[in-house]
Image (cartoon, coloured by chain):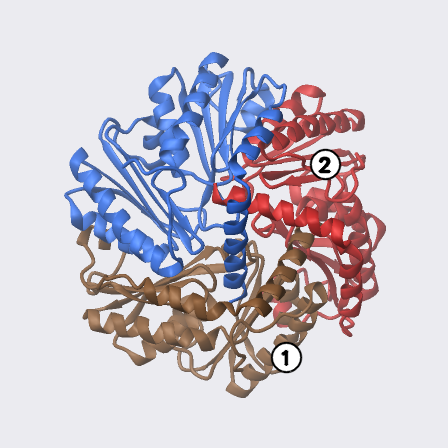
Chain colours: A brown, B red, C blue
Amino acid sequence: MQDQLIEKVMDEIKKRMETAAPAAPAKEEAKSNAIPALTEYVGTAVGDTIGLVIANVDPMLHEKMKLDPKYRSIGILGARTGAGPHIMAADEAVKATNTEIVAIELARDTKGGAGHGSLIIFGAEEVSDARRAVEVALKELDRTFGDVYANDAGHLELQYTARASYAINKAFGAPLGKAFGLIVGAPAAIGVLMADVAVKTANVEVVGYASPAAGTSYSNEVILQVTGDSGAVRQSVIAAREVGKKLLEAMAGPAPSVTTPYI
Amino acid sequence: MQDQLIEKVMDEIKKRMETAAPAAPAKEEAKSNAIPALTEYVGTAVGDTIGLVIANVDPMLHEKMKLDPKYRSIGILGARTGAGPHIMAADEAVKATNTEIVAIELARDTKGGAGHGSLIIFGAEEVSDARRAVEVALKELDRTFGDVYANDAGHLELQYTARASYAINKAFGAPLGKAFGLIVGAPAAIGVLMADVAVKTANVEVVGYASPAAGTSYSNEVILQVTGDSGAVRQSVIAAREVGKKLLEAMAGPAPSVTTPYI
Amino acid sequence: MQDQLIEKVMDEIKKRMETAAPAAPAKEEAKSNAIPALTEYVGTAVGDTIGLVIANVDPMLHEKMKLDPKYRSIGILGARTGAGPHIMAADEAVKATNTEIVAIELARDTKGGAGHGSLIIFGAEEVSDARRAVEVALKELDRTFGDVYANDAGHLELQYTARASYAINKAFGAPLGKAFGLIVGAPAAIGVLMADVAVKTANVEVVGYASPAAGTSYSNEVILQVTGDSGAVRQSVIAAREVGKKLLEAMAGPAPSVTTPYI
């Protein structure tokens, strides 16, 4: 009850502050002031995401990180909030560059939210490739956060691609080159119903099902991964989104997109 | 230090808002407006809890969820905040209905707090039974949150039943039909002392002991489960509550009940 | 985006409240009023830390906690925020007292932050020794939180000791009596770069490397542990701090020390 009250108050304050002074420009300004003079720095993005590169990983660290020795350069994409959006963005990045996904790790994070943060490592023989991969991924995030919806009670995440590549394959074991859909609901109860609607809506194949006790980092999510015909996968993801939004909004009111919906 | 200041400010704001305008009625109104037109929706409750049913779980999902095939209908109880209150509520629900507990999963959640969220699945042959179980559980939550006490530093949770049923048995391995007590302290240090006081106070048997690294989802809790004579279990739970409240309040001031104490 | 706005608003409110009325003294006062009349209570400290002792652990609990039977008395140090600072503080405490570290457990906590909380148990034959250990550790925390830096995007933690003792050895497997350095960056991406800089800067040996999926409780951290010549370890820790601060501040502005830097 207290939590709810605090949330309510915060909403109120937020509303008033939004009217009084727009927050975004000031933020943007603060950010650009702070760009560090480090060759390893690539950029930041939504979800408290940071992109970095290391041209020559120290051999001792290389071994401790269990990286394939053939990649002396790595690209690093890390975030407090988001794993699905980052995996999808990394998938586009490996399609577009001469890199490989060497690690995908999911922290239990989202800054007090119900989901994951992430750490994704690209391996490359040349640092320019690693940098390019991180740049592409950072740019993709605005799109891949499009069908992430959140309110005080939880969040939904929907992802769709017509052609899965190596990041999706590594993260979920989904078949390469086929359409892929990711359906996430938090709290997990919502995800169960979204998963049921998704598989009933269209003729898709279930690649995986994860829940708080299995396949997540104890996040409060149910995560369904589907593959199949691209039309079917897309339809399945959209149907799950519609039911998920109704439930999440029944819990705590409007659950807007973090950026702009695209599916 | 910054965290403490922010908490302090929030308390201040909260206090003022409480005087200015009572939050609960507005909240209630907002909620009832938002009830979704979905046959699967049952209701919501304290702790960002949602209750749902699925009349006919899709066979493919059924298999991925590893549910017993004999239950085509499921009831779903999920929450951001609370696992003990939900297990106790589910225990009353299985007593009262023709359902079985088929899964209990604990997320690391509580929205930035020190404890768990939960996902509990009831199996039933008829959807009406599944719905009834979820309804009973949602109604019980107001009571089972009664001896949950929280402040900025952490929380305590005390649960007592004169007769444990299948949810408690599944979650903790406690003997069926006997009195059962659950003692939770967060941060975990408080839980250690509560556990010691609990077992010293009365002649109870320890069913289980969980801590951040073993038996929890890395929550910052120590959790003791006891069984025995009903008087002894109750006495043990009450003694743990008293010492826990003193410690939690020494850390961060008043730690009121989330609803209304009942033990 | 909403999270960022809320953070911004909070910063604003915080700034105004700081000018209007200093928070610390009132806090201090509230705390001293609340000291519980319990022989087991030792004290509290930064990071929502509490220190407790139990003179005679109940034998049944003793067994469930898997403690060595030779220690009837235990000291308990637990916190919502911080594991490294507490392990380092406990290390000084075992150096200074007739106690042993019997358990170190890491919760996924920090109250919505990216890191760990902790539960550390000292074993002692006499309760006076257990109490002394907890007192020493509580006092050390102000120092060991000195090179913890935090802002809205994450945190850094740097620890250095010229001579590692039993707590560090138990927690990380670092060699006894040698210099030891701990390097933590959150979000984990920052920690990767800090680790690389640390091992490149000076001739240190890597004791361990932990990341969200391995060696942490799914925290959003990369943690490097190094040993070696004391000058080299210190240099390595300082170099990691400098690069970490630049990155964390590029994400979300100033990241001040939680107390006062000492390395």
- Element type at marker 2? loop
Q: Chain for mark 2?
A: B
- Please provide percent x and percent y for residue B25: 80, 58
- Categorize mark 1 by other alpha carbons within 10 Å: few (<14), some (14-19), many (20+): some
In this figure, which residue is indicated by the disc labeled 1?
A: A239
In this figure, which residue is indicated by the disc labeled 2?
A: B175
Query: Residue lying furthest left in this view?
Result: C203
Q: In this view, does A169 lie above or below C79?
A: below
Q: In which quarter of the image is the C terminus of chain C?
A: top left
- Please provide percent x and percent y for residue B92: 80, 47
Q: Is residue B195 left or right of residue C218?
A: right
- Categorize mark 2 by other alpha carbons within 10 Å: few (<14), some (14-19), many (20+): some
> What is the three-letter code of the residue carrying label 1?
Ala
Q: Is residue C112 visible?
A: no
- Please provide percent x and percent y for residue C203: 14, 43
Which residue is painted at 53% across and 56% down in the image? A214
Q: Which of marks 2 and 1 is in front?
A: 1
